[in-house]
Every structure is written in C-alpha cells, then in structure tokens.
Amino acid sequence: MEFAELILTPKLDGVLLYDQLSERPVDGTLCITGHHLILSTRKEGAQELWLLHQNIDLVERKPNIVNNILEGGTIILKCKDLRIIALKIASPQEYFNISNSIEQLSNLEEAKMLYPFFYIPMYNMLEDGYSLYQPEQEFAKLLATSDDWRLTTVNSAYQVCPTYGAKLVVARSITDEQIVQSAAFRDGGRFPVFAYRHGNGAAMLRSAQPVAAPGVSKRCRADEAILNAVLGRSKKGFIFDTWGKGKSSTTETDQHYSQWKKVNRPIGQFSSVSALLDSFVKLMDACNDVQCSPDKWLSRLEMSGWLGYVLNALNAACVVAQCLDQEGAPVLVHGGKGLDTTLVVTSLVQIILNPDCRTIRGLQALIDREWLQGGYPFSTRHKHSCYTPTHQRRKSSSATFLLFLDCIYQLYAQFPCSFEYDHRLLVTLFEHSYFSQYGTFLGDCERERVQLKVFSRTTSLWSHLNRHEVVKSLLNPLYEPNQAVIWPSVAPISIVLWAELYTRWSIDQSQLKITFGQIQALISREKDLRSRVVKLHRQLAELQREYQLLRNEKNGNSSGNHHQHYNHQLHDADVDDPGDDGDEESVSSDALGSSK
C-alpha cells in the first residue's frame, strides 16, 4: 500500500482551524502527507498546525446541510495528547476526501508504515539510546559485588517467556531448567525475575500470577525454589497481589509458600485493564466541560474514580517499600498477567527508595528496565485513548502507563526539590508513548522490536532527550539532590489533579507558564549570586594571603635593620675602649640600653 492511495486531496486552501482556547479561527492552507496533517497561513508569527496522524484518536464529522444541500462541513479531531481541534471545509467533495484520508492514515495497522521508520534526525547523535540501559550495564554493579545473582540468557530466543527480554537477572542458585518449569506455572510464562535490590540487601521480584487452568498443577517446586532462594537471612518474605480478588485472580498456596506472607493491595477492583481507560474517559469528560458548576465538576471528578486509582497505586507502593526498607524482607509483586498494575507498583517503589530514579537518566533507565524490557504492550494498550468510544476500541486498550506518570507527578508535587525533572518530562513521556517520531515505544515487547528491527531502523527517544539543549528545558529549577527515602502522604486530601496535563487545552495556562518562568529566573538569579559570592570569597582569600605576605616581608625588613643597628653599637663600644676588658657589665648595660 502506498500513502498516495489514501491521500485523495493533498492540499486545500481556505480551511478554517478552531481550537479550544482560541477565540478566532485560523484561515490557512491544509496539506496532508503520509504522516502529518499541516495547516499554515504562510504568515510569519501566525499559528500553525503540525499534527502526526498517529496522534489522532477519533475523527468526527459534522456535515453542514442547508436547504437539504450539503455545503461542506466540520471535521473534529480528538487527539491522544488530549486536545480537540476542528477543521471547517466549504467544499462537500473535499470535506469527504479529507475526512476519509485522515481516518485511514490515523489507523494504520502495519507498524512499519508508522513515522519512526521514516524519520531522519537533523542533528548529530551523541549516543545510541537503545544501548544505554542494557541489563549488563544496569546490573553490572549488582553482579560485580554480589555472588547471589547471575545474568541468564535462557530466554534469548523469547521461547520461555515471549514478553520478557532476552537477558534476565535471577538468583545464582537457580538453574535454567528450574526457570523453564516456573515459567510453565506462571501466566504467560512470566516467572519471578529480579527487579530491584535495596541498600540493605532486600530484593524485589515481579511476576505474573500462577496459571489457573484445568490440568495445570497448583504446585511448582521450581517456582518455590526461586522465591526461597532470595530469602537469604530473612525468615519471611511478602507476596503482594496488586490485581485484587476475583475470578481472574489467583495466588500461591499457603501450604507450599509457608515462609511467604500474602498481602492484598489491589489498585482497583476491575476484571479488565480497560477499566482504567474507562475511568480516564470520565476524567477527561469532566476536564473538558468548562461550563459546568463547581459542585457538579467535583462530583464528576470523584465519579471518574481516577484519583482513587492514583491513591491506591501510591498506597500499594508505599507498603512494598516499607517491607523492603524497614522490614528488610524480600518481596514478590504480581497482579494478573504481571503487565500492568505490577509494573506500576514495582516502578513507584524504586522512585520512593532510590534517588537515582528521580534523575532524568535514572527515570529513563527505570522505564527501560521495568516497562520496555519488562514487556508492557505499548502498541496494544495505546492503540486507542480516551476519546475513542467504548464500542470502537479494543478491550486491551488501557491507561496504565499514564497512571504511573500521574503517580510520579504526585510524588513530585509533594517533594518538588527531590526531582531533577519536573512535569514537563512527564508530559513528554506521555505524548511519545502514544505517538512519536522515535521508535522507543513501538511494539508490545522486546521480541516484537527485534522482529521489526526497531533498534537499527529507528531513533531512540533517549538519544533525543539526552541532548544538552533538550535536557536544559526539562530540568527542575528547585532540584536539590536528596539521597533519603521519600515517604509520600497517601491521605486523599494529598492527591491533586495533574492540571498541567489534563486541562492544558481547555483552560488557559499562560499565567502558569509566566509564573514558572519567574521562578526559573529567580532561581537562576540566586545561582548567579551564589556564584558571585563564591568568587568574591575566593578573591578576598587571595587578597588576605597577599596582605599577609607583604606584612611578613615588611616585618622581616624591620627586624633586619634592628639587628644591623645593634651590631654597630657593639662595634663602637669596642673601638672607644679597646683596653678595657674587665667592666663587662657596664658595656652590656650600655648596649642593651641603646637597643631598647
């Protein structure tokens, strides 16, 4: 298939562009390419539109019928970055042509037709983002300083677990044969793998729940061995279930996992991951309705249940972090297939406990380890977003990664000085996870990315974000490195709406940007003043040293003149009375008196 077959009207003049915040429409020329929708007025400084087709979540048509005659219409584009824009077209034929083209181009099924495979960066690549956070590098320190762990390649062909990466960290005492047996016992083959080791040595593992199917044994000795191998000196461990009790929830039997205590901390009582997206739909319905009363808006916000999921995710992460940090006990986290709520919790635990995850590169490494190598199905989950009607989207669509980013925002809001990055990086990650010119979030797992040749044919988002000029735009001006554990408040009153994301297209945030700019200016001014103070201190110290040297030199010269004068006095006394050598006291007294 060629893009030209889908583009019936490549260019059209006189198209009116409406958005949620502008009072007047923009009149310009609309161009459709294989990957972009472009509207330009060709006037310097005027508003332009560059929209990736992949960003479009829903195309709505509103035909303009006058006296039973079609006179063009309006095409409403609801986007995955949450904005809503409208294109008004006067010609009936062009109206149909353009709406059909946009709908087809925004729903391409073949991954290799997407923009990342065509994008060529116009800057020099300083580093390859795809090779930055490989398991050998990420766990190099652990493997070098501990004999308890090893790197296994048992999944190198992705046959043991199709959603895991090719290289995994497991306990050294566990054989590859035991791993294969454990994989058969776990849903999707997602056997317990290493995720994080705390400073006190306590380890966190993650997996899927045991398989609940006829003919599958309820016991697996190899699986028990994997868990018991990480107990170490601990007499007990904890198994956290993040999915909740229900027909689709299974857990380990107490009889066979006697040293492991079961803890149920569900993020939500739902039977499908699509429930998170349903909640997100209700949240955005409320955020886009700027006309409703405050009471009704607050009621709709509560009814969405979104902030409740955020609260539950933070609460679960805090309990797991306490077991690791305060109990010093190992933890296994699972929930359902181990693809959604499990990854949210294990990732948040590391941000709470590990200060490195609060840096820009540390967050990239965390997402690479837990989400990309961990097999979160980005392409499937993000095929549709909150504007696609329920009957038109797949049940496998979800907003799990957004829930994770929202939880980071809550931590950032409570500890604004402990994060090297701010909300701008989180918004950037949200957008690129749905639509991007980079290949980082393509595919559902590492196996698919290898098959698509993503690592050789596309550019990594990390390569872009780590460029100096980009990093500068994402830095938190209030950042002060904090090596301590951060314990967030999980009281309902502490959870806030992420306005910088959810209402940025419906409520004018120019004043917020101005205020943020002023804060940045003040911080920059303070840093300049601190730098000047340090420089002045250095200059003062240098002047003090020079003054001391001059003073010492002056004192040395004065002392030398004094000794010369004293010696002359003695010489004169000897000359005046060369024959008198008996009255030593008299000579001495005169000399001392002269000296004084």
Image: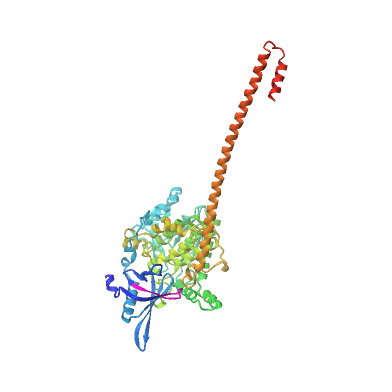
Which of 101/481 is in front?
101
- Whether residue 32 sits left or right of residue 431 in the image: it is left
The colour style of the image is rainbow
Note whether residue 310 is visible: yes
Note whether residue 267 is visible: no
Which of 506/116 is in front?
506
Q: Where residue 561 sits: x, y (%)?
A: 62, 26
Which of 28/113 is in front?
28
Q: How many marks?
A: 0
Q: Where residue 238 sits: x, y (%)?
A: 51, 60
- Whether residue 517 sits left or right of residue 589 in the image: it is left
Q: Is residue 234 above or below residue 274?
A: above
Q: What residue is drawn where x is 46% and y is 48%?
A: 145
Q: Is residue 97 above or below residue 209?
A: below
Q: Dividing the image into 4 quarters, which one contains the C terminus? A: top right
Q: Where residue 248 sits: x, y (%)?
A: 44, 71
Task: Answer whether residue 25 is magenta in the image.
Answer: yes
Going by the picture, which residue comes out furthest to the top?
579
Q: What residue is drawn where x is 64% and y is 20%?
A: 568
Q: Which residues are magenta?
A: 18-30
Which of 474/154 is in front?
474
Q: Dividing the image into 4 quarters, which one contains the N terminus? A: bottom left
- Whether residue 103 sits left or right of residue 535 in the image: it is left
Q: Where residue 12 sits: x, y (%)?
A: 32, 75
Q: Is residue 123 above or below residue 244?
A: above
Task: Answer whether residue 119 is magenta in the image.
Answer: no
